[in-house]
Image (cartoon, rainbow, N blue to C red):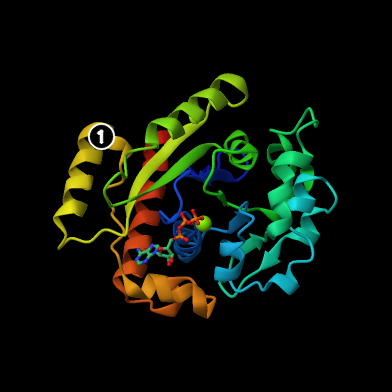
């Protein structure tokens, strides 16, 4: 039986929103860990020069010898850029601030939008047998984010449950449309996930109602609550699922992983 998440090689998902601080990295790390609990082998690609996913998964800057930057420039092979983390089956390609110069350095490279696409489809990828690749994008619609969208099957959009949350979404959708037209016609929207949701706050409820009425089924049923354990976990270099396994945040990311798999089963059927 074919796995619905990976009809051909791993399912590649870009976690993107050009708005800063909306929960992209938190979602990448914790959805990744939750998918691992469900038996998936997951690769997180840190595509943000801030390197927050790398730090949050416990890989210190001095241990980032080969990074996404070398991968994109074809200066390092997959075996040397992929690191293990403390979570079983959760792997990482780290990033450093080096990546911030990629935008400019690559400007004259004809294949500049396809570098991550090609890197993730090299033959050596097959024997690594990943089920899912999650790409943590920077808060920008720059060449790095375009690389992620060209490389991916779908885009998962974290949306912070606060005022102005929906602003900027049309710009993101426009970029997705452009990538579909130019390079990746099958790019789907995996879904929009509300993050940092506070059920006692009317504003969170308003944003949710607004998102559901405007975006319908694209919005995941699961919402990620604002939960202090989620924000503490990265400083212990752990996904919240390991840091406080019973926390509301850990439970929500487990529910999100289950919902994502279910959605894909439906899609594959
Ligand atoms: N569910 C949550 N509950 C509490 N705090 C959260 C939650 N999700 C994220 N945070 C906190 O909010 C901040 C922003 O989250 P995160 O770094 O994941 O956003 P981001 O979109 O990746 O940011 P950037 O755009 O800078 O890459 C972090 O301090 C994080 O710990
Ligand atoms: Mg981030």
Q: Residue at x 64, y 55 (%)?
A: 49
Image location of residue 228, percent across then percent down: 34, 74
> Which residue has dot 1 on it?
216
Q: Residue at x 40, y 55 (%)?
A: 257
The picture quadrant where one finds residue 227 is bottom left
Above/below status of 115 relative to 130:
above
The mark total stands at 1
Q: Is mark 1 on a helix, strand or loop?
A: helix
Q: In this image, 45 relative to 4: left or right?
A: right
Choose between 36 and 46: the one closer to the eye. Answer: 46
Where is the C terminus found, in terms of image quarters? top left
Residue that protrudes farthest toward the right in the picture: 75
The picture quadrant where one finds residue 107 is top right
Above/below status of 137 relative to 254:
above
Choose between 125 and 98: the one closer to the eye. Answer: 98
Q: Which residue is drawn at 17% across and 51% down?
A: 205
Q: Can residue 121 be seen in this view?
A: no
Q: Residue at x 34, y 38 (%)?
A: 167
Q: In this image, 39 relative to 163: left or right?
A: right
Q: Can residue 207 be seen in this view?
A: yes
Image location of residue 31, percent across then percent down: 45, 58
């Amino acid at each position: 039986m074919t796995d619905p998440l990976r009809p051909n090689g791993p399912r590649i998902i870009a976690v993107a929103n050009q708005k800063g601080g909306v929960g992209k990295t938190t979602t990448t790390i914790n959805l990744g860990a939750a998918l691992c609990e469900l038996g998936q082998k997951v690769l997180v690609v840190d595509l943000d020069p801030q390197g927050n996913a790398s730090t949050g998964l416990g890989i210190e800057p001095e241990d980032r010898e080969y990074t996404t930057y070398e991968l994109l420039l074809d200066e390092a092979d997959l075996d040397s850029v992929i690191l293990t983390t403390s979570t079983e089956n959760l792997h990482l390609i780290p990033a450093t601030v080096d990546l911030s110069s990629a935008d400019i350095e690559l400007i004259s490279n004809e294949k500049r939008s396809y570098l991550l696409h090609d890197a993730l489809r090299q033959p050596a990828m097959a024997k690594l047998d990943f089920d899912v690749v999650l790409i943590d994008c920077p808060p920008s619609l720059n060449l790095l984010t375009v690389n992620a969208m060209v490389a991916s099957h779908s885009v998962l959009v974290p949306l912070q449950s606060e005022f102005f949350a929906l602003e900027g979404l049309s710009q993101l959708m426009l970029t997705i449309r452009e990538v579909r037209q130019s390079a990746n016609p099958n790019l789907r929207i995996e879904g929009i996930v509300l993050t940092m949701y506070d059920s006692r706050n009317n504003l969170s409820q308003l944003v949710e109602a607004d998102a559901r009425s405007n975006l319908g089924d694209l919005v995941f049923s699961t919402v990620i609550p604002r939960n202090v354990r989620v924000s503490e976990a990265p400083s212990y270099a752990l996904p919240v699922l390991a840091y406080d396994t019973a926390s509301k945040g850990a439970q929500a990311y487990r529910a999100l992983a289950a919902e994502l798999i279910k959605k894909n089963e439906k899609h594959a059927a």
